[in-house]
Amino acid sequence: MITRLCASLLLATLPALAFAERDLDDFRSEVAKNEWRLSKSDKLHEIKVYVKNEEGKNIRSFRVEATLDAPIEVVARVQSDIDNYTRWYFATLEAKLLKKLSDREYIFYMVHDAPIGMPDRDVVLKATIEPMTAKKPYVVIKMVSVPDFIPAHPPYVRMTAENYVVRFTPQGKDKTLLESEGFIDPGGVSPSWAINYIQGKGPYANMMGMQRMVGLPLYRDAKSPLPYTFIE
């Protein structure tokens, strides 16, 4: 009976081992190429996700492109509504605004649900908005981690980086192209497979969440002024 049990466990493990080996081969290929590779293409929702291993790093960078069915003002409302990030931002347990520095800068806080076996992470980010102008027909938002802005909150592990750049470009009257590129460093002891898994899955989940949010009356029917300057 013990022999049969061991054999069953081995057979159950083989697919996982094969997958791990394929993933390792893929990882080695990426390191060698050091170029963007298409990770996911969802034609139905118009989302593409790319990953890349930077030179000398074991952590992938990500890039995502999505066409949203909403004008740029609606997208900006979703992006600036920090309190509702838990409704769409990947694996986010808590989100809150810490300080509004100006009409183009703010600092906010998030707690992320980490993969099983790892402590949850928290992160403090500073957002800087470069508004759309007549000569620059898109909005740029730069997110940079500021881990020392507030004291650590054990048992959370403070993330070293969740740095990325977002660009909104109008595509006619009722569509917006959202492009984002960046990387994360969760700090603490973090296996590279877990980080790469998050950076592969997170951007796609965020775009699906954003697609859902821009369709809500809360943002589509809003009449109040935007809280920050996205368009000059």
Image (spheres, helix red, strand yellow):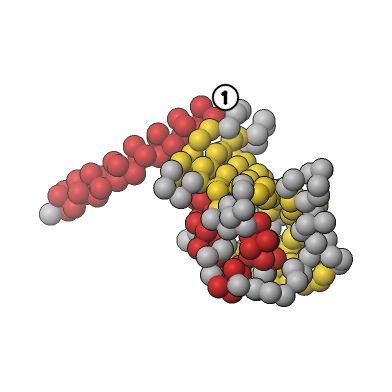
From the viewer's perspective, tell me whether residue 167 is left or right of residue 27: right
- Relative depth, front residue between 127 and 224: 224
Quarter occupied by residue 11: top left
Residue 127 vs residue 111, the one in the foreground: 127
102 or 72, nearer to the observer: 72
Count every numbered label the image shows and give the total.
1
Spot occupied by residue 217 in the image (x, y as percentages of width and height): 55, 73
Answer above or below: position of 49 versus 107.
Answer: above
* Foreground of the two, 54 or 230: 230
Q: Is residue 196 visible?
A: no
- Residue 186, image x and y in percent? 64, 54
Quadrant of residue 213 within the rendered picture: bottom right
**Residue 25 x %, y %:** 45, 30
The kind of residue tagged 1 is Ala
Side of 30 where 8 appears, left or right:
left
> Residue at left 82%, top 70%?
100
The residue depicted at 65 percent of the width and 34 percent of the height is 54
Q: Which residue is mark 1?
A: 32
